[in-house]
Image (cartoon, rainbow, N blue to C red):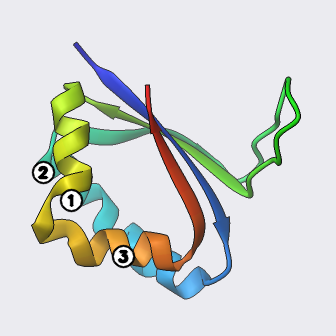
Amino acid sequence: MPAYAFVTLDVTDPDKLAAYRERAGDALAKHGGKVLQASANPTVLEGDVATPQMAVVLEFETREGAEHWRADPELADTHALRTGSGQTSITLL
């Protein structure tokens, strides 16, 4: 059954984010994931939460694939580019 992850980013280092984007597709694919939707203009429809600069929905073949993607030690440098690019969060749905 597919699993989805909701990612928010508030970027402070665009160069690191650009370097992350170069690696992200292969890193996701390694664990059965892909970008389903990305927006540089997300809109909060309800609730009192800050609107992130960017929002992304990732799709994985399985929940375990998403968990392994995030925990994969071979991808630590790739994840560090994302987390070093600013404030990020990932919520597995």
Between 8 and 57, the one lying in front of the other is 8
Could you tell me residue 41's position as x and y percent? 77, 48
Mark 1: secondary structure? helix
Which residue is depicted at the point 16% across and 46% down?
A: 68
Side of 30 relative to 8 (left or right): left
Callout 2: few (<14), some (14-19), or many (20+) C-alpha neighbours within 10 Å? some
Separation of disc 3 and disc 2 at Cα?
17 Å
Residue 72 placement, left or right of 15: left
For disc 1, the marked residue is 26
Residue in view at x 67 percent, y 54 percent: 54
Dot 3 falls on a residue whose secondary structure is: helix
Q: How many numbered marks are there?
A: 3
Circles 2 and 1 in contact, beta carbons < 8 Å: yes
Mark number displayed over residue 30: 2
Q: Amino acid at mark 2?
A: Lys
Q: Amino acid at mark 3?
A: Ala
Looking at the picture, how far across and down is residue 75, in whole percent? Answer: 19, 67
